[in-house]
Amino acid sequence: GGTTASKARPLTGEELAYFNEEFFNNDTEGSTVGLNIHNQFLGSIYERPEDIDLYELFYNGPTGIQEEVTEAEQTAIGPVAFEHYPIKTQRTEMDAFLQEYLGVALDETNKKNLDQFIYLEEYDAYYLLHGDTNFQRCTVTSLEQNEDGTIALTYEQESGEKGIVTLKGSKGSYQFVSNKEA
């Protein structure tokens, strides 16, 4: 048999429901702010996992759950920490998160926009200061199965931006391979 190019096929109702209601958009288990962490992977364009924008990815923290930031930490950050509650991410947590969802360690990434974070060595943690969210719901509109076993999902965000996110199966769920403009 010759090689055939991958063909887009319509999603089954079941697949559409899974990606739109479970994989993306739904409130993450245990999240206090109702963020689904998978949606954060659509916040930047990347050809390879190493190129992901860490600022966009960790803008709301790695879990959607606000980690406690002590007064000592706020003091170490400076006066601005008392105006905007810092979003805290432990370096080890960031590393584990990247390995789980992208298959790369923090040191293997290009550390894109990591300099947007305040890093406190004594706590081995990164902090972001802002008062809003960059969370966006999305609608998956089509699915394409690629020959290498990955799947490409075409989606539209609330803002109207369209993209194609590529996923590969991993431990009963998916890892993110790339996110490109559609």
Image: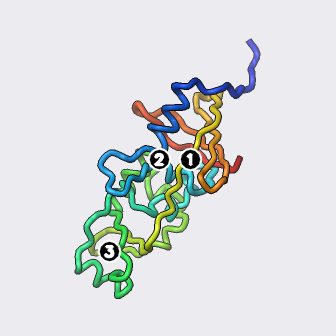
Please name the residue that numbered disc 3 is placed on.
121
User: How far across and how far down the image is residue 50, in percent?
Assistant: 55, 53
Name the residue beneath numbered marker 1. Answer: 138
Q: Which residue corresponds to the image point at 44% horizontal and 53% vertical from the top-left?
A: 105
Residue occupied by mark 2: 38
Task: State the residue in front, 120 or 158.
Answer: 158
Q: Nearer the viewer, mark 1 or mark 3?
A: 1
Element assignment for label 1 = strand
The reply to whether the C-beta atoms of the residues labelled 1 and 3 are less than 8 Å apart is no
Depth order, front residue of 106/152: 152
Of labels 1 and 2, earlier in sequence is 2
| Spatial CA span between label 1 and label 2 | 10 Å
Q: Amino acid at mark 1?
A: Cys
Give the percent coordinates (x, y) of residue 46: 62, 53
The relative height of residue 16 versus residue 51 in the rendered view (above or below) is above
Q: Is residue 147 left or right of residue 72?
A: right
**Nearest-to-viewer mark from 1 and 2:** 1
Residue 158, x across and y down, in percent: 59, 53
Determine whether label 2 and label 3 are within 8 Å by CB: no
Of all residues shown, which one is farthest toward the bottom? 79
Q: Residues within 10 Å of mark 1 (few under 14, many from 20)?
A: many
Quadrant location of the N terminus in the rendered image? top right
* SS type, badge 2: helix
Vertically, is 128 above or below 107? below
Task: Give the Cα separation between the discs numbered 1 and 3.
Answer: 36 Å
